[in-house]
Image: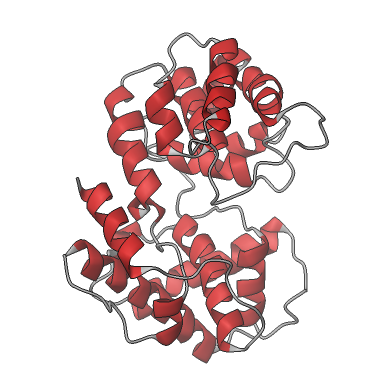
Amino acid sequence: MLSTEAVESFFGWINERHAIYQRRAGGQPPPWTDDAILASYKFTNPFRENDRVTVWMREHWTNPNHNRPAGEIIFNCCLFRMIGTSEFAADHGWVTDWNPARTKQLIMDRLARKERTFTGAYIITNQGLKDPKAVVVVDHFLTPVWRDREKLADVAQTTNSLQALHAEFALYKGWGGGGFMAYEVVTDLNYTPVLANAVDRFSWANAGPGAVRGLNRLHLRDLKKGMNQTQANREMQELLVQAEKYIASNVPLGDVDMRTIEHSLCEWDKYQRVLHSQGEPRSKFSADLARTHVKGAIE
């Protein structure tokens, strides 16, 4: 059974977290919320497009290159997310004719200088390979994508489906498994001409472990209970249908898609863990850092 109280809490998290973003972006001084948990810990935005790095990506990476070939756009989204920082992307530049040796050298040089290179928002594992990370990422994860960029573009253009392209990425080392990295890329492509009109934006998402825990909380199940993607998507669709009832007027209802539901389930689960003394998010919230990030994103 779906808990009404839990559903209200879930959408309440979306409403208040987005309100915090709006207050920060509007230049209001902290505190931006009376919620002690949201004020104390770092939670990402319900809408991924409002995240600082994604804002930079749109303004400096994908939007200026929207008229490039589809395969090229796909590869550059992969390159951006596999490294994950705007600092590296700005240093490297958009790829029209890729030189893997240059990319590897740039990664190694930046790491040697202790310059910010790989993101700390998620972990890029070596997938059991013993080579240095620069070699693994470039030779094993990115090179096959560059080689097959036209094939991937054909899948995107013939299916117009986030899910179909995500499934195709699962065949490539570094992009399969739980599909987290592939999910990041297909979500980015949803905001490019490659998949701007994806038929399944409002019907499919890749449910990660946090989202599954969130669904279990909503249905009052054991938090460790697993589920397949079919069930997870069915339950996320049920939530999406209820958005109109619970989303506050400050939240753009038309932007609440399956990615918003999936991602917010993960963040709401983190919130619930703190609320019920089941653990804490790894990052504390810093008002000073948040002000810097908002200023940088707006500029």
Toward the viewer: 21 or 109? Answer: 109
- Residue at the image position 47 percent from the left and 25 percent from the top: 76
Residue 71 coordinates in the image, percent (x, y): 49, 19
Residue 124 coordinates in the image, percent (x, y): 65, 41
Give the quarter of the image for residue 209: bottom right
In this figure, what is the number of numbered marks? 0
Residue 194 visible in image: no
Tell me if residue 292 comes above or below residue 53 in the rendering.
below
Check the picture and name the quadrant holding the C terminus.
Answer: top left
- Residue at the image position 61 percent from the left and 60 percent from the top: 233
Residue 241 coordinates in the image, percent (x, y): 44, 70
The answer to whether 60 appears left or right of 219 in the picture is: left
Give the quarter of the image for residue 20: bottom left
Tell me if residue 237 comes above or below residue 136 in the rendering.
below
The answer to whether 41 appears left or right of 64 in the picture is: right
Residue 93 coordinates in the image, percent (x, y): 39, 21
The answer to whether 193 appears left or right of 183 in the picture is: left
Residue 205 visible in image: yes
